[in-house]
Amino acid sequence: MRKWTPNARVQVSEPKEIIEFVPIGVPLLYEDIVQATGNFNTRNCIGNGGFGATYKAEIAPGTLVAVKRLSVGRFQGFQQFHAEIKALGRVRHPHLVTLIGFHASETEMFLIYNYLPGGNLESFIRDFGLARLLGTSETHATTGVAGTFGYVAPEYAMTCRVSEKADVYSYGVVLLELMSDKKALDPSFSSQENGFNIVSWASLLLRHGRAKEVFTAGLWESSPHDDLVEMLHLAITCTDDTLSTRPTMKSVVQRLRQIRPS
């Protein structure tokens, strides 16, 4: 018997399927993905999150992809996982990271995205939007919080119960980031009380009639003020501590369409 070591290469005894959504001009083979990531070597890691690590992979000369390796066992049955991932694979939008394909088996699960040279995958997806993929048992108890601090809804951080309303909270945080050009846990908040974040900051300014200070100067000067303040109210509602107060994403989209200036 061969002695197993932590750095031993993955032994691939049979072909493993990769379901492809977007052709990229080169074949997507399981063995090539493993090899291109250096067997998921840390030197190729470009980001870490609650659902796993993301790796840079050159699967052919000049063809780069980002491979998000998921923690096996954190997700529900394979049929439901396949259904949800296929739904994501059908989404096409110029401002969204493209899901190229995925692999899922009992021993390995990963997603393949287009590589973003201006940053890493984690900085774009923030680790939210995966609540629907967690298993039923995961909605009641998990071994740890899967998410980036500052973006995680308070009820999830305390109870590890996931819901779509938790994703709404994360969306609200990102909306505040886009308005202010500040991060969820911006260094400028360090002088405030412990736990002070972009939600606390924006809520405080709004309550004190200082909504203008939330927005970047360029945004405030170039957009209708009433529309901006209404969008700020929407972001604050999305990040409300009370789940029942937070809108659904469908409602958020409807409100954004109403706010959008003609």
Image (cartoon, grey):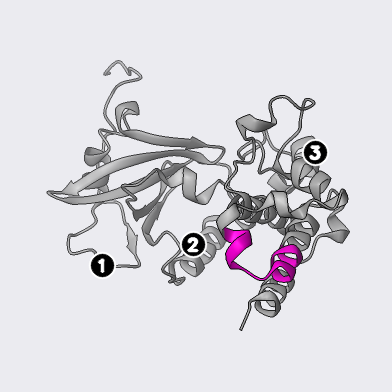
Whole-angstrom CA distance, mark 2 to mark 3, is: 26 Å
- 181 to the left or right of 122: right
Secondary structure at numbered mark 3: helix
- 104 to the left or right of 230: left
Q: Which residue is mark 1?
A: 23
- Residue that extends furthest to the front in the rendered view of this protein: 221
Return the x and y of residue 26 as percentages of the image width and height.
17, 60
Quarter residue 2 falls in: top left
Dot 2 or dot 1: first in sequence order is: 1
State the quadrant of the N terminus.
top left
Quarter residue 77 falls in: bottom right
- 33 to the left or right of 230: left
Return the x and y of residue 116 as percentages of the image width and height.
34, 50
Q: Which residue is mark 2?
A: 85
Q: As shown in the figure, which amino acid type bears the numbered disc 1? A: Pro
Q: Residue at x 58, y 66 (%)?
A: 222
Q: Residue at x 71, y 65 (%)?
A: 231
Whole-angstrom CA distance, mark 1 to mark 3, is: 41 Å
In this orientation, which residue lies closer to the viewer: 140 or 232? 232
Tell me whether circle 2 and circle 3 mark residues in contact (CB < 8 Å).
no
Q: Which mark is residue 159?
A: 3
Whole-angstrom CA distance, mark 2 to mark 1, is: 17 Å
- 206 to the left or right of 220: right
Q: Which residues are magenta?
A: 219-231
